[in-house]
Amino acid sequence: MKALRFTLTAIGGVSLLAGLWAGLSRIGFDLPLPSLELPGNHGPVMIIGFLGTLIGLERAAALERWWPYGAPLCSAFAALAVLFGLPYVAHISAVLGSIVLVCVYIFLQRQHRTVAMATMGAAATLWFIGNFLWLAGYSLQDVVLWWVGFLTLMIAGERLELSRLLRLSRWDYAKFLAGVVVLSCGLAVSLLRATVGVWTAGIGLFALALWLLRYDMAWRTLRQRGLGRFMALCLLAGYLWLALAGLLWISLRESFAGGMRYDAMLHSVFLGFVFSMIFAHAPVIFPSITGIGMPFRAAFYAHAGLLHLSLLARIGGDVLESLLLQQWGAVGNALAIILFLANNFYSVSRAKNAPEKQPW
């Protein structure tokens, strides 16, 4: 299984780089392209090829069974199919991968009947619905709403699972579930009334962001040194981006059809929230998948800081409709992710030569 994990990790990395290249081309940079369809597939390559593979691989590695690997395998294959210009194969593979992930959480829910596990199961279900809509020919503007729901609920469920140590009350759980229900209802309504659905989903995003800011374990680990503090800062920054995304969805709901403000509404979630979570958890997740240590280094603050500063520029450019500010912000986003990969690679390469340090 170790060779399979490395292969899937590599395909996820290729999907990430291809998605970055496609994103820069999509935003207006004149870049050489292997196919003219690649810029239009920026979203699927990133969400299915990179994030879908990563999430499925993480869960499969934790279960240590053979069949859950069907989820990341199908996601990785879908990304390759997109890159090689086989859209129907990509659609089918994405649907199959999400079905396996739903089965994974049905299996886990039978063992651990918790609100957190049910939330992650709901996230996998939203991913299946989004992928099925993609297969059915719906536009990416319709599909991407469900992908946002998938990633948001998956992350929120994982953080809720850790927050059980805080001994949350029934009322605390009820507030969390209210956010989940409102977000899910917004996604369903969007198929009939797009603007109403986006507005409702925005309320759900904002509610979940407030809940995470109030109850997440990050406030406790913020007082630690080294990795604990770094993770906490990334998490709290991500929750602020999610809250901003909710406000943008509420106030700019008519713009969820394309254009610069649509860019702001999506990337405040995908870059601000999701990649903050990736930056925070990479030093923990990568070793669990590969068995290779990734000691924390103070240099990790460089890619995190660059991401947030450049995203502020990008979102500002989107809202103000300044193409120059948007483009340079996007370049900064790409550089932050490349720096993230470089810092991780350097940390892994140094792991065998020096004991882990806890700077700062």
Image (cartoon, rainbow, N blue to C red):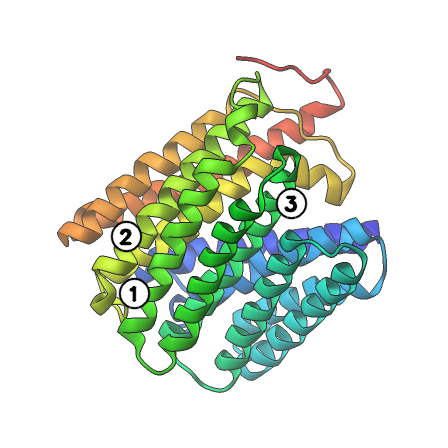
Residue 247, label in figure: 2
Identity of the residue drawn at 41% across and 64% down: 33
The amino acid marked with disc number 2 is: Leu
Which residue is pictured at 48% across the width and 62% down the height?
149
Closer to the chain start, of discs 1 and 3, is 3
The residue that mark 1 highlights is 199
Please tell me which of labels 2 and 1 falls first in the chain: 1
Task: Using the image, determine if residue 120 lies above or below residue 359.
Answer: below
Q: Secondary structure at mark 2?
A: helix
| Whether residue 226 is situated above or below residue 279 in the rendered picture | above
Residue 251 in the image: state x and y as whole percent: 21, 58
| Image side of residue 203 versus residue 270, left or right | left
How many marks do you count on the picture?
3
Left or right, 284 with respect to 61, comes to left
Numbered label attached to residue 161: 3
- Which of pointers 3 and 2 lies earlier in the amino acid sequence? 3
